[in-house]
Image (tube, rainbow, N blue to C red):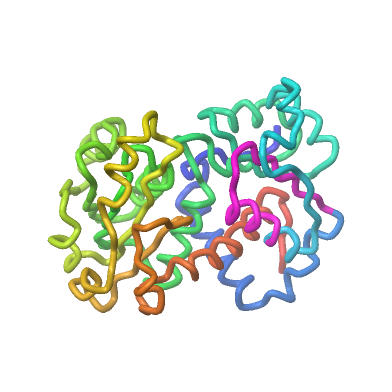
Amino acid sequence: MPRCILSPLDLSVEELNGLMDTAMDIMKNPEKYSKTCEGKVLATLFYEPSTRTRLSFEAAMLRLGGRTMGFHSADSSSATKGETVADTIRVMSKFADICAMRHPKEGAALVAAEKSDIPVINAGDGGHQHPTQTLTDLMTIKALKGHFDNLTVGMCGDLKFGRTVHSLIKALVRYDNVKFIFISPKELMLPSYIRDDLLIQNNIAFREVTKLEEVLPSLDVLYMTRVQRERFFNEEDYVRLKDFYILDKKKMDLAGKEMLVLHPLPRVNEIATEIDDDPRAVYFEQVRYGMYIRMALILKLLEIKVK
């Protein structure tokens, strides 16, 4: 059975560090890697709309010398005819060498992995997991901070439905003395299975607050998230909460000079454009790091070693 990546925890800390080392080497020596995937095909099966993640995978494969194929929404696939995920991946396994899949239903990537003859990378399944966004986040922090140990990480916004937040927490708790500050309205607080079963059970230091301003001075990393309209059951709740946090210049003046601002994108109103040129705002650089870490992951899953 091919190796699949459904969760960040499918990779050991040693493997994560190795991927980041490979990604850094790709950034420094792109020519060395430019033909490593010649003759290989990546299938992108995106049942849910995406811009950055899908194009990042495609750019990663193209820069490795491979090719891509796939669909960008369920409407443009045989899912409209009732084809199951299991049957779709069986078919794609005959065409492609590796697959990246996004699906609105939690567990869909697991179904695909169980039926696939090729490696499957979970590119997001509902509110569940988004491992390559986590790799992107880790890569950004490692490249710009140099380490994970002893950092204080603030996570702000939609902590209830935010799969990127949940995945990043699970990855960061494996490093030494990482402290968390969770900033959200009470309606969007961290779910109990993360708070109780992961953080409290493992004695991880964390605080939960409502006001962003009061914790900004103590943060090494601020991870902003949007309030996701697609995760709400009624429009009234979404409208009431969507602008609860807006990071602007006035708030940034409270933060340390070395604090990094990350965001999985797309942003809506939660980060004012006036701080885009602040050197601490690294969310667009984050996109670039995401492409390189996906290149490293593709090479690993295809078992392609570059000397």
Percent across and percent down for residue 208 are 17, 46
- From the viewer's perspective, is 186 left or right of 294? left
Q: Residue at x 79, y 35 (%)?
A: 93
Residue 290 quadrant: bottom right
Task: Work out whether residue 122 or residue 79 is closer to the camera in this orientation and state it.
Answer: 79
Percent across and percent down for residue 155 are 29, 53
Task: Work out whether residue 265 or residue 80 is closer to the camera in this orientation and state it.
Answer: 80
- Please identify the residue farthest to the top as the structure is shown: 82
- Residue 14 in magenta stretch: no
- From the viewer's perspective, is 170 left or right of 79? left
Per the rendered image, the range of residues in magenta is 40-59
Task: Work out whether residue 101 or residue 270 is closer to the camera in this orientation and state it.
Answer: 270
Percent across and percent down for residue 72 are 68, 44
- From the viewer's perspective, is 253 left or right of 120? left
Q: Residue at x 28, y 44 (%)?
A: 241
- From the viewer's perspective, is 75 left or right of 201? right
